[in-house]
Image (tube, rainbow, N blue to C red):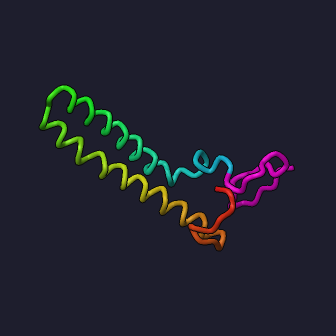
Amino acid sequence: MVHQNENEQPQDFARTTRAHAGEAITDSRAWPGYILIALGLMSLGLTLTAAGGGFEGWVLIAGIACPVLLLAGLALVLLERKRVKAAEGKSLLDPGGH
């Protein structure tokens, strides 16, 4: 059974047991955060590669970029989660699945 409002994405309640199943795909507001996290992980790989190759300048650049990108991405994802939870009348730290 699929319920659909004008303001909501359709959700299949008969086969979905979690309130936010597939949210990362349907809610594109968190995508910039996921992209920044991916860039941070790539920067970590670049940092390790540059350190292994003896490129001190690149180690410094990528070593600074890595935590900045990871923290910025994490902040964006958490802010979006907080917005979604607030719309439900819940706190970010409320237990209950996702």
- Residue plotted at (68% across, 57% down): 97
Residue lying furthest top in this view?
Answer: 53
Apparent side of residue 91 relative to residue 75 in the rendered image (left or right): right
The magenta stretch is: 1-20
Apparent side of residue 34 relative to residue 91 in the rendered image (left or right): left
User: Magenta span has 14?
Assistant: yes
- Residue plotted at (82% across, 45% down): 15
Q: Quarter of the image for the C terminus: give it.
A: bottom right
Magenta region's main secondary structure?
A: loop
For the residue pair 61 and 20, the one nearer the viewer reads as: 61
User: Magenta span has 70?
Assistant: no
Number of labels in the image equals 0
- Residue plotted at (32% across, 34% down): 45
Apparent side of residue 65 relative to residue 76 in the rendered image (left or right): left
Q: Position of residue 16 (x, y in %)?
A: 77, 48
Q: Position of residue 64 (x, y in %)?
A: 23, 48
- Residue plotted at (35% across, 43% down): 40
Residue 39 against residue 7 in the figure, above or below: above
Residue 92 against residue 77 in the figure, above or below: below
Q: Position of residue 34 (x, y in %)?
A: 46, 46
Residue lying furthest front in this view?
Answer: 52
Residue 18 against residue 93 in the figure, above or below: above
Q: Position of residue 43 (x, y in %)?
A: 30, 39
